[in-house]
Amino acid sequence: MPRILKRFLLPIFGLLVIACIPGGEVSIIDAWARPANLGDNSAVYFKINNPGLRIDSLLEVQTDVAAQAELHESEINDQGVMSMHHQSHIDIPPDSQLEFAPGGLHVMLLDLKQDLRLGDTIQVTFKFQNSDEIKLDIPIRQP
């Protein structure tokens, strides 16, 4: 029995312990949103830090100020025309920072229910696959 314990059970136990060690929660920094008028669209930009040891995914963003909040990515084609593509989720690699910025990844706020004026703040909730949701008060500002 001791030989079986050393050979099989101890390595398995070690892997289980490693798998249970938290790698760190995802965080969001430098968040801001563009000003816009009632009924128009706006966008939210930020940086996501994933200090963990495993991939995480941003699954959804919610806010009461828009009819819909969608994950988007802007791309420029060979002719220089920019287009946006809806993303079902955004993967955040382990031990990395992912930037949501104008001309790239962003959260699109569609059909605003109120004006977003410079200096105002809006509450936005970010939902992830592996991390706890994050609620932030995000300032409205110019790029």
Image: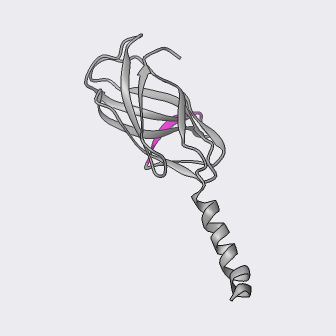
Residue 81 is covered by the magenta coloring: yes
For the residue pair 75 and 35, the one nearer the viewer reads as: 35
Residue 85 is covered by the magenta coloring: yes
Q: How many discs appear?
A: 0
Q: Where residue 19 sits in the image (x, y, percent)? A: 60, 61
For image coordinates 65% across by 42% down, the residue present is 96
Give left or right: position of 72 versus 40.
right
Tell me which segment is drawn in magenta. 80-87
Q: In which image quadrant can residue 125 be found?
A: top left
**Magenta stretch: dominant SS?**
strand
How is colour applied across the structure in the image? one colour
Q: In which image quadrant can residue 29 be found?
A: top right
For image coordinates 53% across by 17% down, the residue present is 143
Q: Residue furthest front?
A: 2
Q: Where residue 10 sits in the image (x, y, percent)? A: 68, 75
Q: Where residue 124 sits in the image (x, y, percent)? A: 38, 31
Q: Is residue 41 above or below residue 86?
A: above
Q: Is residue 117 above or below residue 122?
A: above
Q: Where residue 20 sits in the image (x, y, percent)? A: 57, 59
For image coordinates 62% across by 63% down, the residue present is 17
For the residue pair 79 and 31, the one nearer the viewer reads as: 31
The quarter of the rendered structure image containing the N terminus is bottom right
Give left or right: position of 98 versus 87.
right
